[in-house]
Amino acid sequence: MPRTRYRASVALAAFAAGPVFLTAGGLTALTTTNAAIPVSAKALLIGPFALLAIPIGAALAAIPLVLAIALLGWLGVRNIAVRLPVFWGLTGAAMAGLPFLFVPGLDTANPVQAMFALTGLICALIARHGIVWIED
């Protein structure tokens, strides 16, 4: 029976969560606004503070990532189709974006939901890259 070796998949995905979330926020802002987004000197000074996104994002994403990676790794041992990166990406997007469907007052085209779904998708793919299934 195959077994799973996780290498550093949780750490890689957790430390990427904060910067990926900020990038997803920027992409969402670019795609949802019709006006030009000005770049000023004040906006450039915020850049160094964006480094705080790494530990904050890692702390917030650690528990969901551990649970999801353990579950998908276990399922990947039992079903080879679960090992596909497409499955991992869709699962990550669903886990991060679907809870926003149950928040009252939010529409389905919510930019915050898109930010979380894109972050979940990318972090799941990063985590999938760090997993190896070993056939015995």
Image: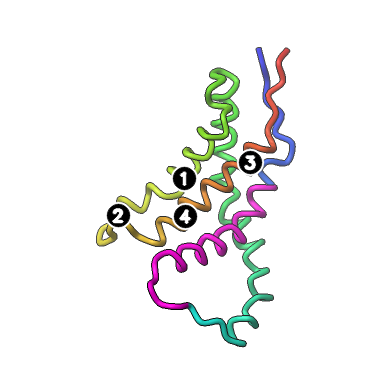
Q: Is residue 15 left or right of residue 98?
A: right
The 10 Å Cα crowd at callout 4, few under 14, some 14 to 19, many 20 or more, is: many
Q: Is residue 102 left or right of residue 61?
A: left
Nearer-N-terminus badge (4/1)? 1
Calculate the distance from the C-alpha at mark 3 to the C-alpha at mark 1. Answer: 13 Å
The numbered mark at residue 80 is none
Which residue is painted at 40% across and 77% down in the image?
Answer: 35
The residue that disc 2 covers is 108
The numbered mark at residue 116 is 4
Calculate the distance from the C-alpha at mark 2 to the C-alpha at mark 1. Answer: 14 Å
Please provide percent x and percent y for residue 56.
61, 62
Amino acid at circle 1: Ala
Residue 66 magenta-drawn? Answer: no
The numbered mark at residue 127 is 3
Please provide percent x and percent y for residue 95.
45, 44
State the image quarter where residue 71 is shown. top right
Residue span colored magenta: 12-36
Calculate the distance from the C-alpha at mark 4 to the C-alpha at mark 1. Answer: 7 Å
Calculate the distance from the C-alpha at mark 3 to the C-alpha at mark 4. Answer: 16 Å
Please provide percent x and percent y for residue 68.
54, 38
101 shown above or below 135: below
The residue that disc 1 covers is 93
